[in-house]
């Protein structure tokens, strides 16, 4: 199970990578954290088999990292759209809330929320 920090970092790597490698400094800038924080979390993600990173090298998602990132990004996108479109939350807040939901809701709660968001009757209420 990924920690909330790992989820945020993995999502950042996924969004920045566009299928290629990402520099640690770009991750730090995107998340507004120190490079030391990035190094620490990337070491944890590498230990979990989500990324590959050479010493002083760029970061790449492993096949497992790509699968997990796709799942996280899909859930994030659905939650972001829900907060933005259905609840009328401003974009910055919707992004933070979607990431927070990914990091704090249990898998069961996320699944139920996403299932509800995807129901045709729920979409028609908008």
Image (tube, rainbow, N blue to C red):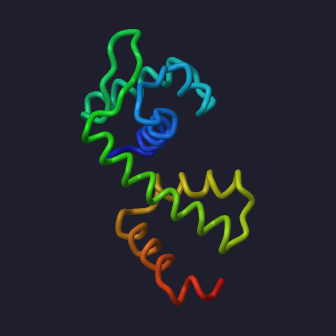
Q: Nearer the viewer, residue 112 or 75?
A: 75
Q: Nearer the viewer, residue 33 or 94?
A: 94
Q: Position of residue 13 (x, y in %)?
A: 46, 34
Residue occupying the point 47% across, 56% down: 102
Which quadrant, please, contains the C terminus? bottom right
Residue that lies at the very extreme toward the top in this rendered image: 56
On screen, 49 above or below 108? above
Q: Position of residue 40 (x, y in %)?
A: 42, 23
Residue occupying the point 50% across, 56% down: 76
On screen, 77 above or below 50? below
The mark total stands at: 0
Q: Position of residue 11 (x, y in %)?
A: 47, 42
Residue that lies at the very extreme toward the front in this rendered image: 19
Q: In the figure, residue 6 lies in which quadrant?
A: top left
Q: Is residue 71 left or right of residue 98?
A: left
Q: Is residue 86 left or right of residue 36?
A: right
Residue occupying the point 47% across, 83% down: 119
Q: Is residue 115 left or right of residue 117?
A: left
Q: Position of residue 124 (x, y in %)?
A: 60, 88
On screen, 104 above or below 67? below
Residue occupying the point 60% across, 57% down: 97
């Amino acid at each position: 199970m990924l920690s909330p920090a790992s989820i945020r970092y993995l999502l950042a790597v996924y969004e920045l990578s566009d299928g290629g490698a990402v520099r640690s400094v770009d991750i730090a800038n995107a998340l507004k954290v120190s490079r030391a924080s990035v190094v620490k979390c990337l070491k944890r993600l590498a230990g979990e088999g989500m990324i590959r990173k050479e010493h002083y090298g760029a970061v790449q998602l492993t096949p497992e990292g790509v699968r997990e990132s796709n799942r996280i990004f899909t859930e994030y996108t659905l939650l972001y759209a829900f907060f933005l479109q259905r609840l009328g939350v401003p974009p910055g807040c919707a992004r933070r809330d979607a990431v927070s939901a990914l990091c704090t809701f249990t898998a069961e709660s996320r699944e139920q929320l996403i299932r509800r968001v995807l129901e045709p009757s729920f979409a028609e209420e908008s």
